[in-house]
Image (spheres, rainbow, N blue to C red):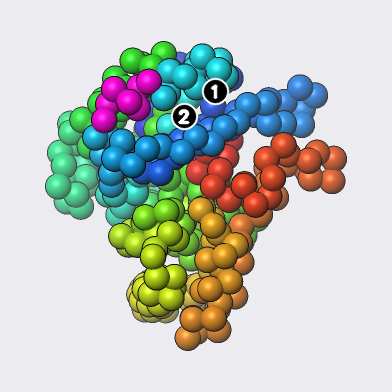
Amino acid sequence: MHSSLFFKLFPPPKFLLMPHVGIDISDDAISFVEYSRPVGERLITKYAHVPLPVGVIEGGDVKDENQLITILAELVKEHGISYAKVSIPEEKAYLFEAEVPYGDFRTISQNIEFKLEENIPLSAADAVFAFDILTGENSRSWKASVSAVPRTYIEHMMELFRGAGITPVSFETIPRAIARVVSSSQEEDVLVVHTMKHKTGIYIVSQHAVGFTSTISVGSEEVNPASYTETLAAEVARVNTYWFAKNEHVGSPIKKVVIVGHDAERVAGMLRTKLAEPLPVEVVDVWRGIFNTNHYVPPILKEDSFEYAPAAGLAL
C-alpha cells in the first residue's frame, strides 16, 4: 500500500485540483513544469529553467530574499504562474521510519505525530510532515516512511512566494518528488544520484517511497572530475552496503543506480568506470512514466529533462 500526506496548506481539495506548476528551487536554478489534460492525455503547457546567481541560495537557505522574489516575480509576469507545489531541499528535512498500527488516514497521521519527538529534534507543533505507507511489519501494523520539516522554514518560504505573487498549495521534499518520477518506471529498490553543480543527493527509493537520503558537498562542476567521481563512487558503495545490511533479512538489495540532475549523462558515464560493485548505472527517462511518448513528444529535450526531474514529480 502506498499513500502520501503532502505538506498541504489548504485543506479543501479544490486548491490541489487547480492548475498549478511544480516548481523546484535549488542552490543553482529554478525549474518549473505545468501539465494539462485537454482530452485526458497529459501535456506540458508551461516550463522554464532559470539559473540562479551564486549566493542567492546556499544549502537550501535563502541568502538574498529580494533577488529571489524578483526572479520569481519575473516568472509570474512571463508565464502567468498563480499556484505552485514547491520543493524542499533534502538538507531541510528529517527522514525516519515508524511502525504504525492499521487504521484510516487520520489515525495513522495522528500516530506518526505522537512519534515525531522520538525521532527528530522538533516538537509536533514545530514540524510539518509527510508519509508513505510501506509493507506491513506484521499482521497488525504497517511501516511508514516519514519526512518532516521545520514549520518555520515552510512559513518563511510561503512568505517569499506570496511576495512574488505565487500561492503555494503544498510543499514536498526533493527526494520524494524525484521518487515519484523514478518509481513510475522502476519496481525494484534503486539508488538515485541527484547531481547538482556544487552538491549531490544520494537517495534510495524502495516500494515507491524514499527510504534513505544524504547529500555530499561536491557536485558535477567539481574542478577535478576524477576526484568527484571517486568521492561519488565511494558514497554510492557506502550507501549500498548500509542498505544491504539493513534489509538483508528481507532480501532487498539495490538493483541499480539511476542518475538525474545536472550533467546526468556525463556523470553516469564516469560513475560506470569507478564502481567496484557491478551495479548497472542508468540515466532516468524522466518522461517515461508521465507521458505516452509514442503519441506525444515533450517540448523539453531529453538532455535537458534530467534537471527537470524534481519539478516534473511535483507537478504530477
In this rendered view, identify the residue nearer to me: 227 or 162: 227
Count of all numbered marks drawn on residues in the image: 2
Question: Does 288 lie within the magenta span?
Answer: no
Q: Position of residue 290 (x, y in %)?
A: 68, 42
**Within 10 angstroms of label 2, few (less than 14), some, or many (20 or more) residues?**
many
Q: Is residue 81 above or below residue 88?
A: above
The amino acid sitting under disc 2 is Lys
Q: Position of residue 223 (x, y in %)?
A: 39, 65
Q: In screen coordinates, is 123 left or right of 16?
A: left
Residue under the image location 78 percent in, 40 percent down: 297
Of callouts 1 and 2, which one flags the residue occurring earlier in the amino acid sequence? Answer: 1
Residues in magenta, as a range: 64-70
Question: Residue 24, can we see it?
Answer: no
Q: Which residue is mark 2?
A: 85
Near mark 1 (Cα within 10 A), the count class, few <14, some 14-19 or many ≥20, is many
Residue farthest toward the front in the current orientation of the protein:
223
- Of residues 237 and 262, which is closer to you in this image? 262
**Tag 2 secondary structure:** strand
Residue 106 place in picture, x, y as percent: 37, 33
| Mark linked to residue 256 | none
Residues tagged 1 and 2 counted as in contact (Cβ below 8 A): yes
Please name the residue that numbered disc 1 is placed on: 20
* Residue found at x 51% / y 74%: 271
**Amino acid type for the residue under numbered disc 1:** His
Q: At x 16% / y 42%, what residue is drawn? A: 122
Name the chief secondary structure element in magenta: helix
Mark 1 secondary-structure assignment: loop
